[in-house]
Amino acid sequence: MPILLFLIDTSASMSQRTHLGTTYLDIAKGAVETFMKLRARDPASRGDRYMLVTFDDPPHGIKAGWKENHATFMNELKNLQAVGLSTLGQSLRTSFDLLNLNRLVTGIDNYGQGRNPFFLEPSIIVTITDGNKLTNSSGIQDELHLPLNSPLPGSELTKEPFRWDQRLFSLVLRLPGLTPPEAEQLGSVPSDESAITPMCEVTGGRSYCVCTQRMLLQCLESLVQKVQSGVVLNFEKTGPDPAPVGDDGILDALKSAPPFGPQLWHSCHKLIYVRPNHKTGVPVGHWPIPESFWPDQNSPTLPPRNAHPVVKFSCVDCDPMVIDKLPFDKYELEPSPLTQFILERKSPHICWQVYVNNSGKYSDLGHPFGYLKASTALNCVNLFVMPYNYPVLLPLLDDLFKVHKLKPVMKWRQAFENYLKTMPPYYIGPLKKALRMMGAPNLIAEGVDSGLSYSVISYLKKLSQQQR
């Protein structure tokens, strides 16, 4: 169920008229209605939830939130007036807080217990503004600042005001007051140079510089395509670049020595698509992406997490591993320099392992929790998420079924116990469930805990009650 939140600039400068005879605010209202018509072509839009926020002082800026219906949204949109200040930072904070209102009640962020891509609430904030100077009651601001303190309980658990399934896009209206003399050039719409652009990029979104009515329609059609179920990850290379692929490895390496310095594909900030199950309409998954710390039962608090996990990938060629009946999760990566680089290598039968720094108990890089692999048809790259430290677990499980016939000997049990010590405790639940599905239900003793301290568990429960 995507959430589409429109943040409309209602500062006084939005009442300026364009060469079309309409005000910027009129164009903004029309843009929202056009977006909704374009979006309605997709049958999936039936589950959409629309919200409306303006630059009015909080809490008056929330015109349609969680409780208001579609008719209220349309009525509030129609009655907007451009009379205030350009309080973009405060209004963005209000928008993110509104989206995050119920997250601790539902437990969607699963703090301290791994991040589940399949448990998400995909949200897009579309800001429509004229890109003029930011103002507040004390004067003009040169940069965009979001208030640090949020009234939401538990907001300190994430470093940023947004979450990995929330992306910000902006339509910055630059339509002139006089008819432009030159013919309009069609093509890709450039990003705007206003204060909101870096914020859009940080969330995995982008800004559009809108100079004509036709360009506006082009942007709205592009935005409709961005309504995707997914979460944003930071992919970063660790270790050396891969050896070049070719018929003659040595000759090829000499011909195409990699240029010095980081390449575009070394670091990508992109979405992984989380597709809904075609039968139920909701995503299904088994394994989390690990936390960037080892849970400590003696710690009274949780370290704050980054909104987007940093996933390190190693360019060492490995064989992709799967075994019968063991579930795994597969997510397609949004096209990027990284996916392009992997596809150009034309090696669909090898994979690159992925890690989260500090997720393990004994090493900085931790153990692999999955791998990146080009599809067999070489038309996309997928992230396979497996049990933590799967290169050790999968051969053990293979032996359990094929060699020991579900009657493990002492040596096998010791190896399995040693494996469990390298696995973050929050993987116990998913692993038990997977083993039950495979027909080996009693391998892990009951009563193994989550690894969080009593004070952390109590605090999270208290936050949930406060948010309710």
Image (tube, rainbow, N blue to C red):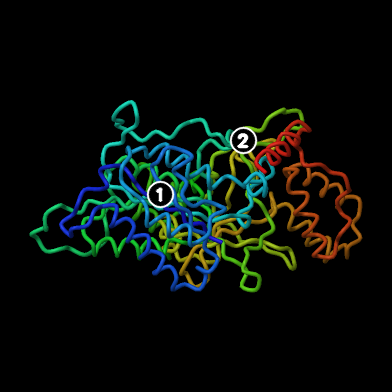
Give the amino acid type for the residue marked by disc 1 in the picture: Leu
Q: Is residue 312 visible?
A: no
Q: In this view, does 160 lie to the left or right of 292?
A: left
- At 73% from the left and 49% from the top, the residue drawn is 427
The outermost residue toward the top is 138
Q: Nearer the viewer, residue 24 or 161?
A: 24
Does label 1 or label 2 sit earlier along the sequence? Answer: 1
Q: Residue 153 carries which label?
A: 2
Inter-mark Cα distance, 1 to 2? 23 Å
Crowd class of label 1 (few under 14; some 14 to 19; many from 20; radius 10 Å): many
Q: Which mark is residue 7?
A: 1
Residue 430: percent from left, percent from top: 75, 54
- At 66% from the left and 56% from the top, the residue drawn is 386
Q: Which of 69 and 248 is in front in this view?
A: 69
Q: Which of 220 and 83 is in front in this view?
A: 83
Q: Judging from the image, what secondary structure is the residue with disc 1 in? A: strand
- At 75% from the left and 31% from the top, the residue drawn is 455
Q: Do the residues labelled 1 and 2 touch (CB within 8 Å)?
A: no
Give the amino acid type for the residue marked by disc 2 in the picture: Pro
Position of the C terminus by quadrant: top right
Position of the N terminus by quadrant: bottom right
Residue 299 falls in image quadrant: top right
Q: Judging from the image, what secondary structure is the residue with disc 2 in? A: loop
Residue 54: percent from left, percent from top: 40, 46
Instruction: Note whether 228 is above or below 303 in the view shown.
Output: below
Q: Is residue 189 visible?
A: yes
